[in-house]
Image (tube, rainbow, N blue to C red):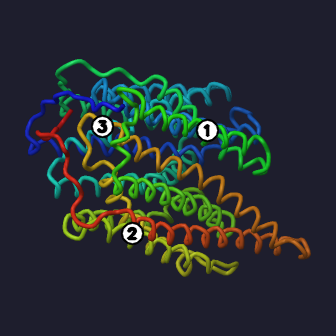
Amino acid sequence: MTTPVTSTVTAPSSNHARRWLILAVLGLSQLMVVLDSTIVNIALPSAQGDLGFSNGDRQWIVTAYALAFGALLPLGGRVGDLIGRKNALLIGLIGFAAASAVGGAAQNFGLLVTARTAQGLLGALLAPAVLSLLTTTFTDAVERAKAFGIYGAVSGAGGALGLLLGGVLTEYLDWRWCMYVNIIFAVLAVAGSTLWLRPQRQDGARPRLDVPGAITVSAGLFALVFGFANAGSHAWGEVAVWGWLTAAAVLLAAFAALQTRVAHPLIPPRVLTDRTRGGALISLLLFGIGSFAVFLFLTYFLQQNLGFSPIRSGIAFLPMIGALVVAAGAASGLLPRIGIRVLVPAGFLVGAAGMLWLTRLGATSTYAGSVLGPLLVMGLGIGMAMAPSMTAGTSGVHADDAGVASALVNTAQQVGGSVGTAVLSTIATSALTGYLSGRTPGPEALAAATIHSYTTTFAWVAGFFVAGAVISGLLLRSGPLPSDPDAAPVAHM
């Protein structure tokens, strides 16, 4: 039987004057984590030339981070609940900076992969701490909505900013600065955390960590992400794909069963039984898939078809970032008045319209005529839905569960990106092969087939978004989001 964690957390008033400074620190910390999912991508060719690893090894620079980050997020969230979120944040920041320094100084492939794995591990502790601190710092509904709007804008725009920053650092400095730049972010965030965050004070005995649950869910998520990662280089019928995905299904089912039988579960069932929270997590997973499609396939189109440099490609995404920030702020202001059940489905539909617009790309398309408009529409759609979904994913939980609820939000986005990598890459490859079948091979045919693979992928994502609109409309509740159930609001832990 599941026994709720009982503890008393004492905190100052939610109207603390430093809450907006704390938001700046948390936003910088989150930006560091999100940037690292894309900033290294631009630097990979330079790193490969410097360290001399193969094309087959290159993917592991990205995959190592995704595996460690995705597999350990639930554990990282619960550890933050147990040791205190300020402690988790500081450990995560300092450790992430140290791992980045090692990666930047790496003289061989093995050390670079090890550093990327360590970044993912520390990111799994850092990301839930950021979101749970945001949840417990802003307890007023209106202010929380504004704070989540800013956080959602950072999370949504971070991938595109990573592409831009990675291009600038690689072209004007060195690929190693794509790692070293995290040290600058971490120093600023550690200084702000030390000055403005107050430590958590917990009365009573701390609950024990659910070790069997931690092992099972981490292994299950590792198998899930690894299986989808293998789908990029193996057929779906190969054991390297379906075997790992089957193992993931078995392990995650075993984890779900375990959580109903332990006294202090890693992810308490009470966190997942809320219908609105479930709808928010599914929404974030689907937006993770869509964001991947925009950043990856549109980057290919910009560089390979329009001839953009890495820096120019990053700049090309800035209008989308601006639209996302504006939409996230507006949606957060509207959330207390019109509710999440309107905003999230509407955001999905706007995003689907942007994706359908991208299906019109062709060999004669230009950035201004065919890319800029869809990017603006996509930014509006993602911004309209992402911040409210994050708010819903962490609303109505006890302070003791804020870390694990925050971890689930991050896990949904990470799994969405992993699923998107495999599924959409497979769709694109099949579309390219099908287009070339029966046609005379040549540069023009290959170029047309490549664009066809992109537009087919965008059409599929539009379908995912329409499905997301339906699912979120059915699951999300009307009216205001549930308030935190704790007797006294918690702030600045």
The answer, for residue 108, to whether it is visible in the render is yes
Q: Residue at x 32, y 43 (%)?
A: 131
Q: CA distance from mark 3 to mark 2?
A: 26 Å
Q: CA distance from mark 1 to mark 3?
A: 25 Å
Labels in figure, total: 3
Q: Nearer the viewer, mark 1 or mark 3?
A: 1
What residue sits right under mark 2 in the picture? 473
Residue 21 left/right relative to 475: left
Q: Earlier in the sequence, mark 1 or mark 3?
A: 1
Label 2 Cα crowd, 10 Å radius (few <14 / some 14-19 / many 20+): some
**In the rendering, which numbered label is found on residue 401?**
3
Q: Please report contact status of discs 3 and 2: CB closer than 8 Å, yes or no.
A: no
Label 3 Cα crowd, 10 Å radius (few <14 / some 14-19 / many 20+): many
Question: Element type at marker 2?
Answer: helix
Q: Residue at x 19, y 42 (%)?
A: 137
Residue closest to the far front: 1
Residue 188, horizontal then vertical, whole percent: 31, 35
